[in-house]
Amino acid sequence: MNAITHCCRGLVYGLLTLACVASAVDRLTIPDYYECPRATGPIKLDGKADEPAWAKALVIDSFVAFWANRPGKTKTKARLLWDDEYIYFHAEMEDADLYADERQTNGHLWDNDVFELFFKPSETSLAYYEFQFNPLNAHFHTFLPSRGAGGMRRALSSAEDWKFNVKTAVLLQGTLNDWRDTDKGWSVEGRIPWKDFNRTGGGPKVGDIWRFALCRYDYSKNFDAPDLTSCAPLTAQSYHRYEDYCRLKFVTTTAAADAGKPAAK
């Protein structure tokens, strides 16, 4: 085989690989809305999601770099529940190289491995919320009255916009900040009280639909850049593209549970 033939075969193989990856992403079906069922019992925040209530939650596992038409390099599974006081979340993330060095609340968590949640309660209002959590259990949380409100600094100029009462627990499967070994991953489990959403009218009622996105940064010794993924079909590499967010419908039980089928796997 001469060099030209070898090069052509390599090019064809590369194109076929890209086509298969693109096809896999294109086949992902984003539902009209994800169902968020009511919690059927208490949730203990320990990072494990082993309470019976979590078995009723839908598993959201289509974390993709939609803007680049490729799947994530590592897997993520997330669940959401709600009750009269809180919205609960749990995310389980594969991660071969756990990394976090930001301990300050509202620090630069996006420079670490991080799990993020965005909620936009109203289709007509521009206001939305952002929450971030890293493997050190540090928090970033903010209310943004508008994506274009003179930039992030102006949006966060009020001290009131920083006040939240989020509670979380993280669980690590590996050694933090040691690139020499291979880790398994980490998880975060938390709750956000509905009073933290009073800036936009508080919590939802049964049947209400909010916009949302669950997102992730994964830094790794195995990557030449952090891997960014989201469950929302973002058309550009920005987690603030709320026009692309998924919809979340608050229900009592999921359609799968009503049909006698398991909601989670």
Image (cartoon, rainbow, N blue to C red):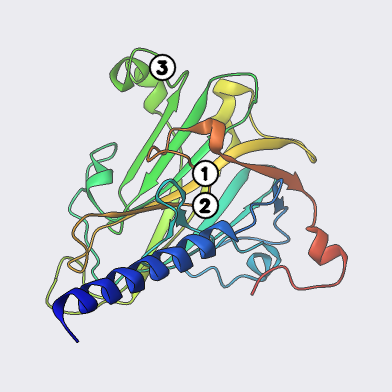
**Residue under numbered circle 1:** 213
At label 1, the amino acid type is: Ala
Query: Mark 3 sits on what residue?
Result: 148
Question: Looking at the picture, how far across and down is residue 8, in whole percent?
Answer: 27, 72
Q: Tags 2 and 1 in contact by the CB under 8 Å rule?
A: yes
Mark 1 or mark 3: whose residue is earlier in sequence? 3
Is 105 placed above or below 88 here? Answer: above
Q: Provide the secondary structure element on which disc 1 rests.
A: strand
Q: Residue at x 34, y 44 (%)?
A: 139
Where does residue 30 sit, x and y in percent of width and height?
64, 52
Along the polypeptide, which appears first: circle 2 or circle 1?
1
Distance of label 1 from label 3 (alpha carbons): 18 Å
Q: Quadrant of the N terminus?
A: bottom left
Task: Report which residue position mark 2 lands on.
Answer: 231
**Visible residue check, residue 174:** yes
Task: Tell me if 112 is positioned left or right of 216 in this view.
Answer: left
Q: Is residue 45 visible?
A: no
Q: Tell me the crowding category of disc 1: few under 14, some 14 to 19, or many 20 or more residues within 10 angstroms, Cα based.
A: many
Could you tell me how many numbered marks the image carries? 3
What percent of the width, then of the height, locates residue 40?
A: 73, 60
Q: Please tell me how crowded label 2 is: few (under 14), some (14-19), or many (20+) other residues with Cα within 10 Å.
A: many
Mark 2 → mark 3, Cα distance in angstroms = 23 Å
Label 3 environment density (alpha carbons within 10 Å; few <14, some 14–19, many ≥20): few
Q: Looking at the rendering, in which quadrant would you find the C terminus?
A: bottom right
Q: Secondary structure at mark 2?
A: loop
Residue drawn at 27 percent across, 45 percent down: 109
Q: Amino acid at mark 3?
A: Gly
